[in-house]
Image: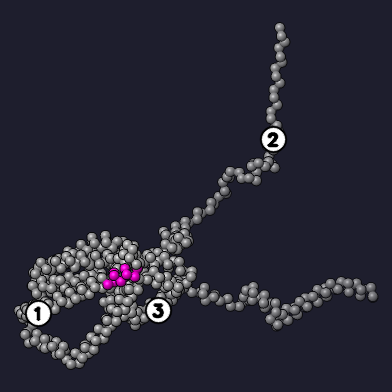
Amino acid sequence: MARATHRWRGRLGPTAAALRARLHAADGEDTGAADGGPAEAGGAAGGPAPGGPPPRTPPAEAIPWGLRVAAEAAWRLLVIAGGLWVLFRVVSALRIVVLAFAVALLVTALLQPTVARLHRHGLPRGPATALTALCGFVLLGLAGWFVVWQVMDNADVLTARVREGVEELKQWLLRSPLHVTEKQINSVADSLSDGLASGGGIASRGLQGVTVLVEVLTGILLAIFSTLFLLYDGPRIWRWSLIAVPAAARPAVADCGPAAWATLTGYVRGTVIVALVDAVFIGLGVYFLGVPLAVPLGVFIFLFSFIPLVGAVVSGALAVVVALVTEGLFAAAMVLMVVLLVQQIEGHVLQPFILGRAVRVHPLGVVLAVSAGGTVAGIGGAVVAVPLVAVLKTVVGQLRRTAAAADPAAATGPGYGPPPPEPSEPEPAPSGPPEPGPPKPGDPGHGAPDPEGPAPRQPPPGPPPEADPPPAESPP
């Protein structure tokens, strides 16, 4: 009996041990799942549990690539637009200071070559600056006084001619097929007279005139002082202004200064020459046609020529209107022909050769710049808008050249060089077995013997043995 029990215990022992091991393993898995242990962590790390929801895609990867690029570009454009809006608000608030300093820069660019020439001939910089500024301001004052004198001297003649022109226009309207009556014309004239003669209008215009006069005098004085300091100490003022630039970008900005100043000097000098040519030839044409106020019209054409495109149109239209009112339709047509001829010579001959390609701006850019400058700061803004655009164009080009010199790879980056070649499509893999190519080192038949073929012959280790000399013949 004991022997049978021992035999059965020996047979069931391994089975019972396996069952106990299985029970212990099951208890361990249940305990780990309840405590959030390794089983749950392994399932979370390895992937979703069987039968559970699929994992969610991250939000940045769920948005299409095009929409992400558009969003990135949109917020950057919004930041740039906000900065420009703040800049325009500051310029509008400080319009007098900004315009006075801009005019001082233009006058300095015109007079600075004279100061440099006098300084090279031995005159100290202080007296050279004072002499140049005094002569320049005296010439400008004489030109303004001459214009006012000519207008006041010809005011009576111009008033009488304007009245005659208005009466001729009235008679033409009465005879025209527009069916305009004399009562309607008189009603319009009475309305204009009442508006001009109203007391409140006169008072408001008087106050506005005083305000404008004070602003103009303040701007003139500020422009004079700024011009004097820029002529005398311009290089040191530029070096002082570089302190506000970060040290890493200071060398590149310092290189932009001379290039921008050369562009501004060339622009002002070329514009003065072009404006002088326009004023002289159009003034001579108006004078020989017998139109009054020829000299004041020439001065107005000279001043308005500093506003590209728009100024030429306005000054030419003014000359044509004066000729039409004073001398009639034929004289106005002749003045129009003279104006168009001179402007064509200016646009196709003078500007390309005098201003040069370095300061040329596209006509669309000129129109947009003049419109933006006039909207922000009036006539003064229209005058300084185009030289500002020309200077910015030069600064951008200088920064690109500096970046290319510092890092040649920057000149071939996006937007600088030709577009990269399009990737070619991969060739389809051959469907058949590969063709045998030339043997490579280590392949069978290249230096190593083929284990299945005969071994190659080895060359003899040394030089070939010399042949035995022929036996010497015995003497006779």
Determine the CA span between mark 2 and mark 3: 86 Å
Location of residue 122 in the rendering, given as x and y in whole percent from the top left corner: 33, 63
- Sequence-wise, the earlier of marks 2 and 1 is 1
Whether residue 218 appears in magenta in the rendering, the answer is no
Task: Give the CA separation, mark 2 to mark 1.
Answer: 125 Å
In which quadrant of the rendered view does residue 210 lie? bottom left
Q: Mark 1 belongs to which amino acid?
A: Asp
Q: Which mark is residue 82?
A: 3
- What's the CA distance linking mark 3 and mark 1? 53 Å
Q: Could one spot residue 453 in this view of the protein? A: yes
Q: Which residue is mark 1?
A: 156
- Colour convention: one colour
Q: Are marks 2 and 3 in contact (CB under 8 Å)?
A: no
| Residue 432 located left or right of residue 412 | right
Q: Secondary structure at mark 2?
A: loop
Q: Nearer the viewer, residue 48 or 23?
A: 48
Could you tell me if the residues under marks 2 and 1 are in contact, i.e. CB atoms within 8 Å?
Answer: no
Q: Residues within 10 Å of mark 2 (few under 14, many from 20)?
A: few
